[in-house]
Image: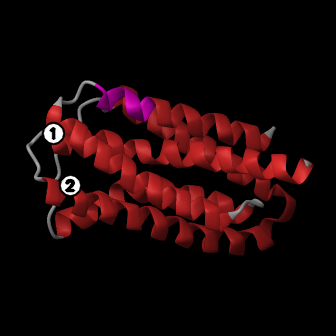
Amino acid sequence: MDQVLFQWGQFLTLLMIAFALSMDAFSLGIGVGMVGIRLREILKVSITIGLFHIGMPIVGIFVGAYLSDLVGDIAVFIGGGVLMAIGLHMLWNGFVNGDQKVLRTKGFGLIIFAFSVSLDALTVGFSFGLIEVNRLLAITLFGIMGGAMSYFGLLLGRSVGGWLGDYSELVGGLILFCFGLKFIL
């Protein structure tokens, strides 16, 4: 029974982290969607972001697992500290950089856009390489949530505008900070 509760707890924790990481894609998707993007383009952008939300944490996990052997027991504190730092960075960006830039969603512009909204997933993957976590579940949730939230952000931006975009990054940063604090305590 305790094993089942632990697995559900870990699933819900990873789902919340995936949600927090996808808030960048959602908020930037709103800004990009406001320019009147076509549905086919929305699907292409969302799939690309979802794939980046899978690939970036994989790289981070490998680097984190390598460093975990080097730093030993301090790894949990480092992983939690990284999550807290990402959360604080997202909060800072939400307060200071409230206006979103509209990026190109074709060719190299799409790659840069997907890379930029997936950088947080790279660093969270790094922290997951340092701590014990179901990595396959985490990566799967990151990809699904990143693609879905970018899709919904692009659709929302296309239809109603940018009134929610500023707040979504703040919520995501607060969630990541709290989970980083939970790992440390």
Residue that numbered label 1 is attached to? 158
Q: Is residue 152 above or below residue 57?
A: above
Q: Residue furthest right?
A: 1
For the record, the magenta segment spans: 164-170
Which amino acid type is marked by label 1?
Arg
Question: How is this picture coloured?
Answer: secondary structure
Q: Is residue 168 magenta?
A: yes
Residue that numbered label 2 is attached to? 42
Q: Is residue 38 magenta?
A: no
Identify the image quadrant of residue 127: bottom right
Residue displayed at 22% across by 29% down = 162
Give SS at disc 1: helix
Give SS at disc 2: helix
Given residues 46 and 28, the one toward you in this image is 46
Q: Is residue 133 above or below residue 35?
A: below
Q: As drawn, is 113 to the left or to the right of 65?
A: left
Which amino acid type is marked by label 2?
Ile
Identify the image quadrant of residue 59: bottom right
Residue 107 % position (x, y):
16, 70
Q: CA distance from mark 2 to mark 1?
A: 10 Å
Residue displayed at 44% across by 30% down = 170
